[in-house]
Image (cartoon, grey):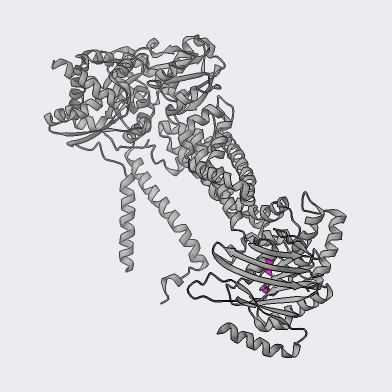
Amino acid sequence: MPARYRIATLLAIVTMVFSAFAPVHAAEGSRDSFRVCWSIYAGWMPWAYADKAGIVDKWADKYDIDIEVVQINDYIESVNQYTSGNMDGCAMTNMDALTIPAASGVDSTALLINDYSDGNDGIVLKGSDDLTDIEGRRVNLVQFSVSHYFLARALDSVGLTERDIETVNTSDADIVGVFANDDVNAVAAWNPQLMSIDEMPDSHVVYTSKQIPREILDMMVVNTETLKNNPDFGRALAGAWYEVMDHIAKNDEEALEIMAEAAGTDVAGYREQLDATHLYTDPAEAAELMNDDELLETMQRVAEFSFKHGLLGQGAPSPDVIGIETPAGTYGSDSNVKLRFEPRYTEEVAENR
Amino acid sequence: MSLVQAKGLEKHYGRDVVLERLNFSVEPGEFVTIVGASGCGKTTFLKMMLGTESITRGQLLVEDKPIPGEPGPDRGVVFQKYSVLPHLTVLGNTLIAEELSRSKLLGKLFGSRRRQAREAALERLTEVGLENALDKYPHELSGGMQQRLAIAQALMMRPRILLLDEPFGALDPGIRQDMHELVTRLWREQQLTIFMITHDIDEAFALGTRVWVFDKWRDDPHAPEAYGATITYDLDVERNREDAPSQAKQIEEDMHS
Amino acid sequence: MKRLINLKPRRAARVALALLPFLLIAFVYLGVSNARHAENPNDRLLPLPAQMAETFAGMATEANVRTGSIPLWADTAASLQRLGIGVGISAVAALVFGLLSGGLPLFRAPFSPLITVVSLIPPLAILPILFIAFGTGEMAKVVLIVVGITPFLIRDLTGEALRLPNEQRIKAQTLGASSWQVMLRVLLPQLTPRLISTTRLALGSAWLFLIAAEAIAAQEGLGYRIFLVRRYLAMDVILPYVAWITLLAFVIDQALLWISRWSFPWYHVDEKAAS
């Protein structure tokens, strides 16, 4: 092979590698094709139905765009996909929206608040039904996840701090198996693992997210600039989501069955999970939460917790380094707003009814 | 009393007869060289002498007792290859014989007992001319030196019988001549009884006091496995020294026909 | 011009050729990383070298407020201890069982089929069983490494023992060796250097099992840290940690090779001739 061809080949390979990792200019200009991702969780199962039943396609067609809904098996991987720019939107919690994309400099907007955990997160002790007995124990949990935040809130409620316990990072897939072991006597977990742990002998759920309603929020987060340039993308997602919510509000067996199947359970099992999840089937109610002062307070608490654990970046000087904008006001730096709560699209759905 | 005796000795592999009609008696101090076409059962016979190959029928006796079914220190051996241990030095390869017999648990000697054993090993190594290569590993030795070491090692236990399986087959002719002198000298000095397999008929006649030719006693072209080899010629070379060259020539022609 | 198979680089050219792929990777990385940072100065996926150096220096010098220990060293000590104990137990067990299996046909007959089957079980698939049996502490992590690599080591050592020329065993017996002495003085010394070289190969799997164990439940360790910070995409921690693990693995590998060459010069005859 002549030398110049070799160089050409080499350049071609280098270019290929470059383009695989190069920044995705997802945000630039107006487009007509989008990708959003989600992972298995009670509050996000409606996306499975919205995708399968063609509801997303129907709404996308209405605005003459194309939206691909991708299910990703690993939650963190799905968030990372969004953060690295491969996705235009992703289902995630309010805390992860702050600590992963926002803290990575990706300006993100909470387009929809789908639900809040109303018992889906819990702390389980062996041999005691009193939360104060957690003092001095080793707690297995997914560190730096909402479980960790939730644990901190629980400790706070009985006058303890994280210094009074030890934490063991445990993968969520293995937490049930780990709890079966004799040397483990405290865990913080979420559903469906929480239910399995609760069924084990001598286990007591001593604290659940029922006690801190409207704090652990599950949302659809999209890239702010993409949304700004393509408001129809937001409209289509909101429209599709609340159409599915109508099915749930009407107790549509067929819809529930598809969601249950995608979650790997049956309708009864899925209903049980939904009981611990406060789904906002009414857009007006969701919009109300977005506009409320309470949300601002919650996000401040989340930011402070995240800062304390170094989740806002190693070099972050203070908890308010990242600005969080809600209709009720902005917490933190005005010049570095990276997480926004935008009720407009939810309100539009409510108004159109 | 004969040292080694065979009475109607046979070896079969299933229906395949390898050796049969083996009858002989060997006196102490004889040097038996064994020749024959490849695949004629020479090595099988040597393995029966070693004890690593079982006897199908008949008897193989050493001092009127059946030969043990496994190798032992009364029968030393030198193979064409792999006779010495690659992980031990020249000294270690000879010393190990003393160590194995005098330290049953560790197989290793220390202090004054080691010094005594070292003396014995040194004596053997001097006999074969390796006294200047004590700390060398086998891979650092030439083929001839490796076989010298193998011989010194085999003689450490002062066996009465020494079994040699084509020990010089891989050596250059010049070195082979030196080895012949060495083996002859050791055989005389230590009153060994030697069984040596070789494919070189001149070597067989030059070294042996007795030459055995192994061949099939009957050949059936329709059933080649039905008849085994036996000793077709048993020549007393010592008594007929002057006839040896012509006899060698005759046998060579027979084997090739 | 000579055939391609006969063209050998000279010393200087060889060094340059060895460095070339690394430089190429570094070049590509820098290019993409800079491009991403021009777009978003806070990008975490491909941190700039300065950023990684700063983070790594912090991990190596600043004590964690809560635990009081310096993360990098605490993680390294914890992981190396687990790896050392796990690989150590595996090596000793492999030597003992390889020796018995390779030396005694009566032991090999029932043992060898069992170990062949056991070595085919993927250890990560039976994790819950390991949890129940060995807890979730240090023991479980060490056991995962042991379960993961011992059957492979035993199979390899048994094979090696069987590949040793039978002449050696016969010769030793003609020198009066007992079964025990044949294993102790003929097989053991020749299996030991093989064990070292096979362990070098198995170290890759050992690291894999270690990191998998630390990802499941742990309070410190290199794998623990990587899986922890993966939660918020801290590639500025993960990439230097990966480099650090690679360096540790390389040093351990070379140390084993050096020990083997120094202790068993006869074992390395062929490779010297080849190089």
Looking at the picture, how far across and down is residue C202, in whole percent?
A: 54, 47
Q: Is residue A317 above or below residue B20?
A: above
**Towards the viewer: A184 or A284:** A184
Q: Is residue A124 above or below residue C31?
A: above
Looking at the picture, how far across and down is residue C143, in whole percent?
A: 56, 35
Quadrant (top left, top right, bottom left, bottom right) of the N terminus of chain B: bottom right
In which image quadrant can residue A261 be found? top left
Q: Magenta stretch: dominant SS?
A: helix
Quadrant (top left, top right, bottom left, bottom right) of the C terminus of chain B: bottom right
Q: Is residue C73 visible?
A: yes
- What residue do we see at 55% from left, 24% from top? C66
| C162 drawn magenta | no
Q: Would you say C160 lies left or right of B160 here?
A: left
Q: What stretch of residues is rendered in magenta? A: B137-144
- What residue do we see at 37% from left, 44% from top? C33
**Towards the viewer: C29 or C78:** C78
Q: Would you say A87 lies left or right of B30 here?
A: left
